[in-house]
Amino acid sequence: MKLKFDPSELGEREIYRIGGKYYFRCKNCGKLKYIRPADLKREGNRGYFCSKNCWYEYFGRVETTCAYCGKKITVPKNKFLKWKTHYCSTECYNKARSGLRVPVKLEPLSELAYVLGVCLGDGCVKKYVVGKRKETRYSIILAVEHKEFADSFTKALETVGLRPNIFLTQRKDRPNENPLWRVEARSRVFVEWYNNITSDFSKLEEFLRKCPKGFEEFIRGFYESEGHYYEGLNKYGGRQRNLHIYNTNKGLVDLVVKILKELGFRITVRVDRREHLGRKDKYCIRVLAKDIVKFFALIKPVIKNPYKKRK
């Protein structure tokens, strides 16, 4: 899905010169509107629609319901695809955001073990200061290409008691890359608890042992973030399956290795030395080919799983 308007989809602009001034014809309503001569030479979305309403009407609207009161509403198609929840008014939005506060559940849960695995991989848990007022924020963020992964992480956060937002985003400095699904939630309680439990991996291991299927869910989240599966040909021409998990934190890698061995997997660990390049050494955990089928049957990742489509 494209996040930005592409003028090539609508063809060329209809430009008219009347009384020494330039006008363009709106693609939706046909109304003539003034356009500056400098804008004629610029590339972009100028000279196609006379207002935002015409933009939305041209690209269509989608019928949905208000996430707070249930009232039927229509929203622009591009906003319907980008946002997960929609509200009929600012009043409903404010009530939904400042209504009942659900306490964060930090007791041993399988969903919380999964969240920890994701956050130690592609996820980001941080405390930062923004704005002139020096406001402190505590955020849990995940940005990935796979919507299934983002949805799985969102559901886990909701079970824990957080209220995440999920939306598509495009980096301005990398317009040619695929847009990312961004999941973001805020909680000071969770961030402080996370920083405490991940400061010592022995605490993390003890907590995971208390969670129902804690080891399996933790590995699932970590594999979906840092794992890689591919098939190819070996030097004899036969099919070769490879399952690798990468990370640069040795303490975390040691914990993942210990968990995988307790789950019954045979693994090897390789170190890619990169200190001479000014970078951290990268550790590669490889699950032996004979245990790959068992790995997917036990861990059941939502992405990077070749057996998911064969259900």
Image: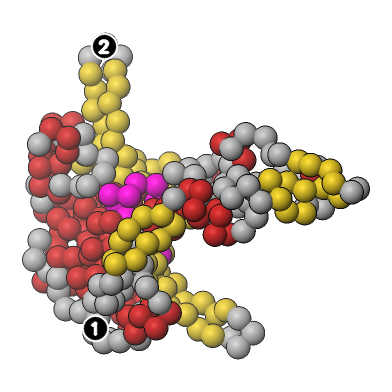
Q: Secondary structure at mark 2?
A: loop
Is residue 142 on the magenta stretch?
yes
Identified at 28% across, 18% down, the residue is 234
Considering every residue shown, the one lying at the far top of the view is 237
105 relative position to 280: left or right: left
Residue pictured at 28% horizontal, 56% vertical: 151
Where residue 293 appears, x then y in whole percent?
12, 35
Q: Quadrant of residue 216?
A: bottom left
Sooner in the amino-acid sequence: mark 1 or mark 2: 1
Q: Is residue 33 covered in magenta?
A: no
Quadrant of the frame with the C terminus? top left
Q: Is residue 242 visible?
A: yes
Q: Amino acid at mark 1?
A: Val
Which secondary structure, mark 1?
loop
Q: Which residue is mark 2?
A: 236
Residue 68, given in percent of the width and then of the height, sits at: 28, 76
Dot 1, crowdedness within 10 Å: few (<14), some or many (≥20)?
Answer: few
Furthest-right residue in view?
20
Please name the residue that numbered disc 1 is placed on: 102
**Quadrant location of the N terminus in the rendered image:** top left
Q: Amino acid at mark 2?
A: Tyr
Give the residues in magenta: 141-150
Relative to the observer, which residue lies in front, 80 or 215?
80
Q: Nearer the viewer, residue 205 or 138?
A: 138
Asked if residue 43 lies left or right of residue 251, the reply is: right
- Disc 1/disc 2 C-alpha distance (Å): 58 Å
